Image (cartoon, helix red, strand yellow):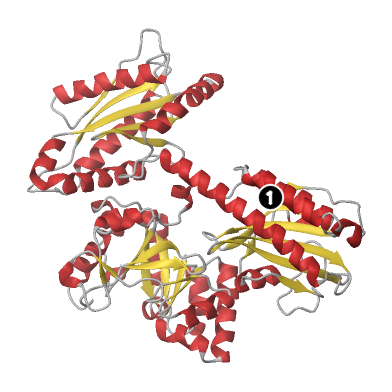
Amino acid sequence: MLPVFNIPDRAIIAYEAIPRPSASGDHLSVVRSALAAVRHTTPAVLLVPMLGDLLHAAGIDPADLAAEHGAKPSDIAWIISSDAACGAGRSIDDRVAKLRTAGFMIAFEASGWASECHDRIAALRPDFLLLNGPVVAQVTRSEVAGAELAGLNSFGARLDVCLVARGVDDATIANALTTSGLQHGSGAYLSPPLVLADDLAIAGDAVVGPSWFRQHEPRTLATRGRSIVAPTKVVSLATSTSAEAASDGFAQTLGEAARVLQAEHDPDRILGVLGDLLQRVLPMTGLAIFEADWERDCLIPRVLAGSEVVKLRDLHFPMSGGITGWALARGVPYNCGDTTTHPAASTIPGTGGDQSPESLLVIPLIAGDHRIGVLDVWRSGIDSFSDRDLEHCALFAHVTAAAWNNAQLYRELEARVHTDALTGLRNTRWLDETAPQETARCLRSGSNIGVLLLDLDYFKQINDTGGHAAGDRVLREVALVLRSVVRTGDDVVRFGGEEFLVMLHDSGPGGALRVAEEIRATLAARKPVLNGMRVTASIGVAVFPMHGATLDDVIRAADLAMYEAKAGGRDRVVPVPAPMGATAAGSR
């Protein structure tokens, strides 16, 4: 497997499965071997090649292949070559549509610069567009290649396609790509191919164990808890227009900012401090602070000031677009004397094309190797900012970026405290801290929480036969199954050992029972793990507040029902009976 990185900050976003020793043999076996890696690569996306005629094979269902390995379709992007996509016409459209309906992502493997396949790419709208190494290497040697890449960047941004450059083999290529706005890639400069089996390794590979993936956490919004949904804050501009008067207190104001930000862990307040204090020392007509969303390759406004700038409030921008994106790719503060003549300039939506001359300071917010956002400051007129203004703005940005990055790390640490290291599920500490709020919300709204407590049958035999490594693998695979069955917004907790707790929000007894049976059946249908041993589960089902005044009471009721399922022969679901007079109706 070859890790795919966000090049500027070296965060893993996906893995690409590479056939070894070749793809000339049993294509289906190669795909199955690739899918077996999902238990290691999740929650990152795994790019799997759709080899040979598998794309058109009537008897092969990719959803069944994924289910065999406990993978959610959203964990997988099927790689389709340009030869297959551009030569198959309508049949490929239908096949891709079925894959999307099943929940899979699509990766398009381009031939050359993909210019001959623009129509097919636009029709298929893949999630990833893969550029091959020989083409990527041309960027450092040819202006034509640079122009091709710029055009492809713009094309990909319009279609919301993630461009991935293979063959990023040295720093020169990496710098040329990021300067051109392409953020994602794979290659020797970023990481060698990762091989789990010694006999498949060749020179240059890195042989790793399953623990490698746990130690290199990928960047995914679901696991890092950084889904960028915070509202944009609009602040008013300071009334001072005297640059000299404002600059008198620069050192004092910068010191005040450093003191306030040092103890702050809330990103919203950190950005608010920058928006408020910077105006004391730098008169301006507009200000914007953007957060870099590397998952969606866009810039999201977080703080805005100024009558024209506030029109950006509900907009997201391609990370490679405009003067802001251009400056972020360069990674250094930039003083633009005239925004109307800069070659990367673009008009703010809703402001029209007739703009008065204005100057712009663009300061990338960088902490270490992480480009986390951008600060834009406007002033009317041409060449209105001095070098001293740029220096002052950059100092404020530096202090803010460090505080912002620390706040993000703090939140990630909080998330890890509430996450089970082996399975990636929530842990009992999260449950203890969250249960009071969840039950209070439930009582206020008059809703229910379906509670499933499941215990894996004969799990000790798996540990005794295959060792704890086999047991750990089974636990991770069960976690994948649970996440694939429950809805987004429901919670899955590793309750201890081989026990798991599922909380189904706004779900009554009927819905909870259906989900429990789906989980039981999905586990029972999986292929044996060791010497014919199958993984099954006994599940108890209860509902809050029907079966208890507290969540602990309901969990105890589900626990008793689970032991009843064990006593009744295992691999079964037992619901807690409804109390006398209770309403059994409920939805999921």
Q: Is residue 218 above or below residue 391?
A: above
Q: Position of residue 418 (x, y in %)?
A: 42, 38
Q: Quadrant of residue 181?
A: bottom right
Residue 84 is situated, as x and y percent measured from the top left of the image, at: 36, 77
Q: Which quarter of the rendered picture does the N terminus lie within? A: bottom left
Disc 1 on helix, strand or loop? helix
Residue 214 point in image, percent of width and height: 33, 53
Question: Where 490 sits versus 227, above or below?
Answer: above
Residue at screen point 36% across, 31% down = 428
Q: Which residue is drawn at the image coordinates 23% and 76% (left, top)?
A: 23
Q: Which residue position holds label 1?
A: 258
Image quadrant where residue 99 sits:
bottom left
Q: Is residue 285 above or below residue 229?
A: below
The residue sitting at the top extreme is 580
**Is 38 left or right of 370, judged from the image as shown?**
left
Instruction: Examine the rendered structure and indicate whether residue 308 appears above or below residue 346.
Output: above
Q: Callout 1: few (<14), some (14-19), or many (20+) C-alpha neighbours within 10 Å?
A: some
Q: Position of residue 486 (x, y in %)?
A: 38, 39
Q: Tell me, yes or no, if residue 364 can be seen here.
A: yes
Q: Is residue 227 visible?
A: no
Q: How many marks?
A: 1
Q: Quick one: quadrant of the C terminus?
A: top left
Q: Nearer the viewer, residue 416 or 117?
A: 416
Amino acid at dot 1:
Ala
Q: Is residue 526 left or right of residue 189?
A: left
Name which quarter of the figure residue 245 lies in.
bottom right
For the point 68% across and 59% down, which residue is it?
A: 397
Give the residue displayed 80% in from the left and 56% down from the top.
Answer: 250
Left or right of residue 339: residue 51: left
Q: Nearer the viewer, residue 66 or 60?
A: 66
